[in-house]
Amino acid sequence: MREQPGKILHEYQEKDETLPTEITCEKIFRYFPELTEEQKGQFRALGALYREWNSKINVISRKDIDQLYLHHVLHSMAIARYMIENGINARKIIDVGTGGGFPGIPLAITFPHIEFTLCDSISKKIKVVTEISNSIGLKNITPKWGRSEDLKGEYDFVVSRGVTTLKNFIPLVKHLYTKGIIYLKGGDIYSEALECSRMCHIPKENFRSSEISRWFEEEFFIEKYIVSIGDFDKFTL
C-alpha cells in the first residue's frame, strides 16, 4: 500500500532536525515570515530527502550537499522574493533545465496556487523531482522529461537557474511563455544582456536585473542576479 505523503513528510522532518543545513533552513523562514507551518515542514523535509536521493542519483555535487539550503533552496527563493516584491502574477510557470528541482520545487512550495512544470532532458533527474515532490505532498508540480525546444504548452513565465547563456537560452524557450523569463544568473550580466538583445532581436528595455544581495545578506549572493526579460507591463496582469 502506498504511504501517505503526510506520514512521509513527518518522518523526513524528524530526520532533518539534526542536519547542519537546518540553521540555514530556519534563516529562510526569517526571510519569508509569510510561510505557513505546512510550508515550513515541506522545506525542513528537503534536507533529508535530497541527501537520500543524492546518494542514489547524483543531482547535487557531493561537496555541495551540506550547503543545500543556501546554494540551492535560498538561491531559488530569490525568484520568489522578486515576484512578491514586484507584484508579479502567474497561473502557470515552467522551470526549464530544473536538474534536481531548482528553482521549481522551492517555488512550488512558496506558491501553492501556481501550477509548475519542471522539465529536464535527463530522465533520472526527473525521477528525483517526482519522488521528492510526492514525498512532501506537492500537488502543483508536473515533472516532464524532455528537451525544452520539443515541449508544447503555454506558460506565463519560464524560470531557470543559469543553465546556459541568455543568447542560447531564449531560442530554446521562446515558444513557451506569454509574459517573460525570470532567470538566475551570475557574471557580467550587462554585457550578456546586450549581446542577447542583439542576437535575439529583443529591445534593450525588455531586460532588467536585480541584485540578489539586496534581499539576502549571505556572501554567497554577491554578484548573483535575477535577470528578467519580457514585456513588463504584462508581468502583474
Image (tube, rainbow, N blue to C red):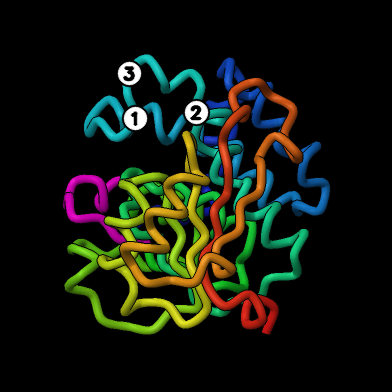
Tag 2 secondary structure:
helix
Q: Are marks 2 and 1 in contact (CB under 8 Å)?
A: yes
Q: Residue at 46% across / 60% down in the picture?
A: 159
Which region is colored magenta?
118-128
Which amino acid lies under the numbered mark 3 shown in the image of this protein?
A: Arg
Residue 105 vs residue 210, the one in the foreground: 210
Residue where numbered disc 1 is placed: 60
Residue where numbered disc 3 is placed: 62
- State the quadrant of the C terminus: bottom right
Q: Residue at 31% across / 63% down in the picture?
A: 199
Residue where numbered disc 2 is placed: 68
Left or right, 62 with reference to 224? left
Q: Residue at 61% across / 52% down in the picture?
A: 209
Residue 153 vs residue 134, the one in the foreground: 153
Tag 1 secondary structure:
loop
Instruction: Decide: is 226 above or below 203.
Output: above
Q: CA distance from mark 2 to mark 1?
A: 8 Å
Of pointers 3 and 2, the one earlier in the residue sequence? 3
Q: Are marks 3 and 1 in contact (CB under 8 Å)?
A: yes
Does the segment drawn in magenta span residue 187?
A: no
Which amino acid lies under the numbered mark 2 shown in the image of this protein?
A: Leu
Residue 169 vs residue 206, the one in the foreground: 206
Residue 63 vs residue 142, the one in the foreground: 63
Instruction: Decide: is 77 above or below 55.
Output: below
Q: Is residue 129 visible?
A: yes
Which amino acid lies under the numbered mark 1 shown in the image of this protein?
A: Ile
Q: Residue at 52% across / 78% down in the picture?
A: 179
Left or right, 211 with reference to 188? right
